[in-house]
Image (cartoon, helix red, strand yellow):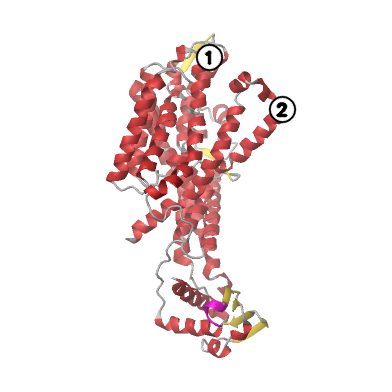
Amino acid sequence: MTNFKKNFQSFGKSLLFPISLLSFMAIFLGLAAALQNPNIIELAPFLQNELLQNILGMIRRISALPFGYLPILFAMSIPLGMVKRDKEVAVYSGAVGYIAMLIGMNYFLSLQGYTPETTAIAHLMDVEGMSQVEATLLNARFTSTLGIFVYNTNVIGGIIAGLMGVYLHNKFRQTELHAALTFYSGKRFVPIISALVMVVVGIGLTFIWPLINAGIINMGELISETGLFGTFLYGFTEKIINPTGLHHILNQTFRFTALGGVENIDGNSLVGALQIYLYQLDNNLPFSTDATRFLAQGKILHMVFGMPAAVLAIYRMALPEKRDKVLKFFLAGLTAVILTGITEPIEFTFIFISPVLWIVNSIFAGLAFLVPAMFNVGIGNIQGGIIDWLVFGVFQGLETKWYIFLIAGPIFFAMYYFSYTYIIRKFNVLTIGRRKTDFEDEEEELENVSVKEADRKIAENIIAGLGGLENIIDVDNSISRLRVEVKNGDLVKEDFLKKSHPNGIVRPDSHTVHVVYGGRVSKMRNIVDNYMYEQKA
């Protein structure tokens, strides 16, 4: 197996850490959100109980954790899954690097005059003289991540930080600095270099991200001008750019600006698809299908029918002995997507390992918007799960044409199932359950580590002097000393340790040995680490 293939598989598996948390929490988020929905409360008045609503609010707040912090979870999980040695150092460095990237981006944005105050829609319209569309488009580029004002890079920012964390860890883990700086050598140097490098990466993103954003804006303008094809293009674009977080910009512009429609109702000028729909809903008016074509109705076929079919295909293509675990893994995500339209727990399991699956998924997502628009369906809101279908479709009467989904739904289910099954088999896509190591708790196979012959002899003497591998509990180092905790101090043989030419040997207690190397300590620590790792492999 090539290194690239091994690394790619490790990357795919590393994403399961945040996805697992995401799918589990999504169930509680979806249920709590549903039970706080005003339409549901109206049907079940007992839900109005203040204590019950407070509890649901707390559950909703806690279960939203992975959604609000998903980028940094990716920044930590990728090193955790891809690095073979000193994982804790890599994870820590990934988090440090991500924060440094945000700080670099924030600082450079402030130099350009972009702050939360100067990018507020009201400020842009009142002070800068922008139209509502222009102000909304500019405002949608930014967000506050970990309390830091930055471009909204979403999970892509976390993935960049995570991959850079892996690269920097592997490259600088054994760096030896000048003797005066030896305390900062080795593993301690990794988070330091991560902070320095990722600040520059953050600054670089301030130049790159606006170009990507400009492409999305141009696409939005094209969508608004091309009728039914534009509806398909909206659904396709929203899905294909989902990992970048830029789909929020697309959504916002159609929900709240003239790109989503302008209608004059009862003397009120309403701008944006969602504002038009909510006004009509609140005033018991017929729904504008020109507005709802950009709302929840375009997601129901994809989420309620398509995603379960995709999971079924992944389940059927898994190894027979893994299928039970695959089903259990996806159960939480299926519940979430069907109830409330949260797709990430399912999509993120294949989005980064198969571009073909992701493109097909995006095409079907576009068709999911196109089909209801062709039949003038009138279902609004924004989630797209079965709750939206019931509350804003079935409960609003036949005029919404909610029954269209009962016909088109099974067709979409079949489209997803057969296309996913074919692609997974044809391209041998390693979706969950297709590898023998999936769901196994044991450590991944250790990589071979070559130790130079001269270093090997030094390491052998040190290990023998410490009483052998079985006698060593822990190895660490200070600015000048190799600090070793041993099981039995009587097995320590200083004659062997002296063959590595230390400056001295200190025995603080019966279970601790300090071998003083001065400025050489980082190199000696790496020699010992590599040898011990090789022997374990």
The amino acid type, in three-letter code, at marker 2 is: Glu
The amino acid type, in three-letter code, at marker 1 is: Gln
Q: Residue at x 55, y 56 (%)?
A: 96
Q: Position of residue 314 (x, y in %)?
A: 38, 42
Q: Position of residue 50 (x, y in %)?
A: 72, 27
Q: Are marks 2 and 1 in contact (CB under 8 Å)?
A: no
| Residue range (magenta) | 467-471
Considering the numbered disc 2 on the image, is that residue within a helix, a strand or a loop? Answer: helix
Alpha-carbon distance for marks 2 and 1?
Answer: 29 Å
- Mark 2 vs mark 1: which is more N-terminal? 2
Report the front residue among 396 and 186: 396
Query: What is the number of callouts on the image?
Result: 2
Report the front residue among 468 and 447: 468
Q: Position of residue 224 (x, y in %)?
A: 39, 24
**Dot 2, crowdedness within 10 Å: few (<14), some or many (≥20)?**
few
Q: Residue at x 53, y 51 (%)?
A: 104
Does the rendering let one see residue 256? no
- Residue at image mark 2: 50
Mark number displayed over residue 280: 1
Residue 443 shown left or right of residue 310 in the figure: right
Q: Main secondary structure of the magenta part?
A: helix
Q: Residue at x 51, y 15 (%)?
A: 396
Based on the displayed image, in which of its 4 quarters is residue 411 positioned? top left
